[in-house]
Amino acid sequence: MRILDGKALSQQMKRKIAERVEAFQSEGKRRPGLAVVIVGDDPGSRSYVAGKAKDCAEVGFAGSTLSYPEDIAEQELLQEVEKLNADPEIDGILIQLPLPKHIDSDRILRAVSPEKDVDGFHPRNVAGLWLKEQCIVPCTPKGVIHILEDNGIEISGKRAVVVGRSNIVGLPVAKLLLDRNATVTIAHSRTPDLGAVTREADILVVAVGRPELVKGDMIKPGAIVIDVGVNRNPATGKLCGDVEFESAKEVAGAITPVPGGVGPLTRACLLENTLECYLRSL
Ligand code: NAP
């Protein structure tokens, strides 16, 4: 059984990005710039944003965090996004979710210029993914594909099962696997006998947000298991995935740990997307 080490892979990706940034600078070009917008004081969101700022510093991007009070008016936030859209030094804009309840998140996400939408959430990028046109691919699904491809795991011709059908993870992962010629099944909360479906998978991607929902006996021997979930185990309080790691590792051929699997790849893909936007702006 192989542990698919997302942390090591993300470090390799960051090194490559840092080298390219250094090269741009030695050619006298500006640095890629990522702006992260955060509203309010949610400690979870703060820690994610701090992580993104650290990543930017590590690869030499100009990273800026724009913090706004919890009670900012939607109109004012829209104006701030417009300023970032117009700023030639900013290549990527990330709106840290969730936003406070009085703000329409969809409206804010759609206000981000599709050219700077490093999360790939803008309808134009979503359409681009489904129509196979130039687009920005959302970070977590992109990270899942990186883990598979960079570890030399063949996707074409495989039976893939994706558990979860959210717009930000399940659906785009399924589409990316389909584009790479896997035969894809999407399971969700109304799927009867989930284990019977997951046991068909050569590649099993789980993105549900339910601690350790998928147990070892729901996995085909030798399957590749990608656990996207990030949860707190209610019994231990520790971070855990949507897959019960201890039983799954006895059956799987390869598996991502939580933490240290998909999470670091998501962060590295945010940098990759920012670099992509920068290159298109040159
Ligand atoms: P979400 O929007 O809540 O979607 C969850 C999906 O799981 C839904 O499609 C839901 O089905 C399905 N589901 C829920 N309970 C189920 C069950 N018992 N059996 C089968 N399917 C079930 O969640 P998300 O945003 O996709 O995130 C999923 C997980 O990934 C969360 O733990 C989140 O924290 C994590 N995540 C991690 C990263 C990372 O970087 N590592 C990034 C993003 C998200 P219905 O559609 O039928 O309701």
Image (cartoon, helix red, strand yellow):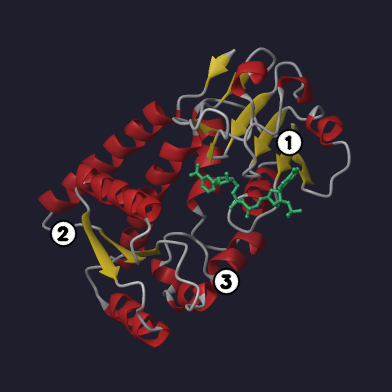
Q: In this view, does 170 lie to the left or right of 257?
A: right
Marks 3/1 in contact by CB < 8 Å: the verdict is no
Q: Which amino acid does label 1 sit on?
A: Ala
| Badge 2 amino acid | Lys
Residue at 35% over, 77% down: 81
The residue where tag 2 is placed is: 29
Q: Which of marks 2 and 1 is in front?
A: 1
Q: Is mark 3 on a helix, strand or loop?
A: helix
How many neighbours does mark 3 have within 10 angstroms: few (below 14), some (14-19), or many (20 or more)?
Answer: few
- Badge 2 marks a residue whose secondary structure is loop
| Few, some or many residues within 10 Å of mark 1 (<14, 14–19, 20+) | many
Residue under circle 1? 160
Looking at the image, can residue 253 be seen? Answer: no
Position of the C terminus by quadrant: bottom left
Name the residue located 38 percent from the left edge and 43 percent from the top edge: 268
Where the N terminus falls, by quadrant?
Answer: top right
Disc 3 designates what residue?
123
| Near-viewer residue (109 or 136) | 109
Residue 66 x/y as whole percent: 26, 67
Amino acid on which disc 3 is placed: Pro
C-alpha gap between disc 2 and disc 1 = 42 Å
Residue at the spot x=60%, y=22% of the render? 245
Q: Is residue 61 in sight in this rendering?
A: yes
Q: Which of marks 3 and 1 is nearer the N terminus?
A: 3
Cα–Cα gap, marks 2 and 3: 31 Å
